[in-house]
Amino acid sequence: MTLPRSLKWIAGVFLATILLAALFISIFGWNWLRGPIERMATEKTGRALAINGELTVKFAWPLPRIRAAAVTFANPGWAREKQMVAADAVEVAIDLPQLLRQNIVFPEVRLERPVVFLEQSTGGRKNWLLDLNQQDEGARIRIDRLMLDQGMLGYDDAGQKTRIRAELSTSDTQSAGAGVTFSAQGQYQGMPLKARGNGGPVLGLRDDSTPYPLKIDATVGHTGVKAGGTITSLLKFSAVDMRVALRGESLAQLFPLLGIAFPDTRDYATEGHLLRSGNTWRYEKFSGRIGDSDIAGTFQIDTGGKRPAMKADLVSNLLDLADLGPLIGARPGSVQAAKQAAPPPAQTAAPTPAQARVLPDLPFKTDRWNSVDAEVTLKAKTIRRAKELPLEDLVTHLSLRDSVLTLDPLNVGVAGGHLNAVISLDGRNDPIQVRAQVRARKILIARLFPTVELSKTSIGQINGEFDLAGKGNSVRRMLASASGKMGLVVAGGEISKLMMEKAGLHLWEILELKMTGDRLVKLRCGVADFGVKDGTMHVNALIFDTEVTTIVGTGSIDLGQEKLDLTLNQKTKYTSPLALRSPIYVRGSFARPDVGVDKGRVAARALGAIALGIVNPLLVLIPLIDAGPGEDSDCGQLVREARALPHAEKNKTKK
């Protein structure tokens, strides 16, 4: 078949063009393209591109390769550094099909001895965006894989207080294998940064098919990270599979790094397996410690919603109660410091707030509560605590939704019984609105006061309910504004007779029991009923009734000032030959309560005894004899009488 003359002519022209181009290139080389490329780059970006060395091209479909020596590409005028890129040589593979669609895609880029500076201005401009104003996110070159052969990389972001300088080198030895070794230092979000590590020779910036091996040891501020494993797509982190160890002074210091609010804690260290798939990050099967408490479990974050959603299942075999202090705003050692700083009894000056305060007073940081939604479960098998706090186990579920934090339930074993609580803190308001509902069930008296010698023989159970609402940005301020009710009831049992004789100030019986030994007496009734208003607990009924004596209390407790103002009156049920018959006053602060008697009344009775003794030595004991009511009392009637006492005292005051 003979081709038409027109087609022969077209084929001839095409072949002639190729031959002429090949002849031109063979004579002049590719360097003639340097000028057109430089002018085009300057026209499109407003920044100078200079190719000061040889330019070569290797044709291949669909990825031809271009290599240029001694290349520089300028920064825009607002940047700190003059050049964005300076390299001994640049070699790129160009995706021709994408170029025909007006997309600049470099599947591979190799830089030899590069110096690269990336910078973002406070106004949001980024020097790696190639439009004239450096603000069009679409005006960037897509690089899938990057190879660096020794060089330096810098990154500046004034708005984020970040300035990092990294040095990179290549290795190709039998022991280490081919790869990149790096070290970096500088500042990240205002915190000092140091890092070192190594990775594979080809950085998969956008490569979703090949995991990139990476090992890193970094310190940011007071947080340390050691990690080893693989990351798929270094720019997108489309998949992560790494072993990660974290350490730091407080989990709250992770907020600048992760953008997620964690509570203030003591120093911590953990190690576990970090995985990412899609929008889900999972730190699984980790173990470690927070303070002196061990911690283990699984931690997960889903970033696909309105805000990150956190879910954690945590277990502690040994939970040190001191490690929970920062979670509720307690200052380490605050109670001990207050006790040590309080003035001795001889001083009359009121203690300063720093001396008197024992309730947690550090404010909660609610401004970060809207950074995450959370569902966290914590189970503690054993609790290390002071003897004064007989806690046995802890199970709680924390929920944080739209800045509302709820603990439901908060269950803790106390002295053989349980405290079951539901606590809600609404961080949408300033100050925080808080509601606490607490139930105490089957708490054993003997185990509640393990350090009190006389209580070791006591039996009986305490049950109670608290229902309080208040507002404030710390535990102390919440209690200072609280209103509601608090009630405790002792259900039967027996108690030390010596304890009750001491409470009744029965000197004769105390001496007798010291000589013959203590014994148990029946505990008939125990009630503590408080009405709470604006941070003050007012006694509605405070009764402790036994076979020996009945103690009835009146007064109040100021939660805001942390002051005690209670009076305990004894009603002896039998005649005591030697008793002081004085109310017991409980005064002072929470940090240093002061328990005493009415010295004037005791002195008057003592003077009366002395006067009678002058008349007749046998009459000396008459003022010290407490005849008592002579009969047992009804518990219900005692409660009614006790509740009537505050009203009667108010009426006397008015008159």
Image (cartoon, rainbow, N blue to C red):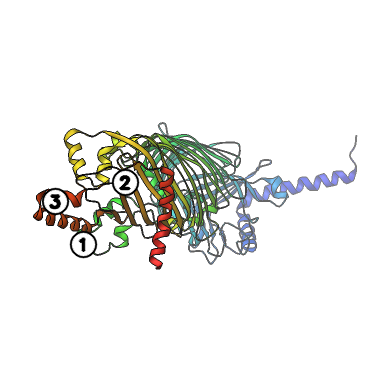
Residue at 35% x, 49% y is 552
Q: Residues within 10 Å of mark 2 (few under 14, many from 20)?
A: few
Residue indicated by mark 3: 620
Quadrant the N terminus occupies: top right
Is 359 positioned to the left or the right of 349 in the image? Answer: right
Can the viewer see residue 117? no
Q: Secondary structure at mark 2?
A: loop
Above or below: residue 482 compared with residue 65: below
Question: Nearer the N terminus, badge 3 or badge 1?
Answer: 1
The location of residue 569, given as percent across then percent down, is 31, 51
Q: Single out the mark in the foreground, 1 or 2.
A: 2
The location of residue 508, given as percent across then percent down, is 19, 43
Q: Residue furthest bottom?
A: 655
The answer to whether the residue labelled 3 contacts the one labelled 1, judged by CB atoms less than 8 Å apart, is: no
Q: Residues within 10 Å of mark 3 (few under 14, many from 20)?
A: some
Q: What's the distance in space between the residues labelled 1 and 2, CA to CA? A: 39 Å
What amino acid is labelled 1 in the image? Gln
What amino acid is labelled 2 in the image? Pro
Residue at 57% x, 56% y is 128
Is 526 positioned to the left or the right of 344 in the image? Answer: right
What amino acid is labelled 3 in the image? Val
Looking at the picture, tell me which residue is in the foreground, 389 or 256. Answer: 389
Question: Nearer the N terminus, badge 3 or badge 2?
Answer: 3
The location of residue 565, given as percent across then percent down, is 33, 57
Residue indicated by mark 2: 629
Residue indicated by mark 1: 347
Q: What's the distance in space between the residues labelled 3 and 2, CA to CA? A: 22 Å
Q: Secondary structure at mark 3?
A: helix
Q: Residue furthest front?
A: 616
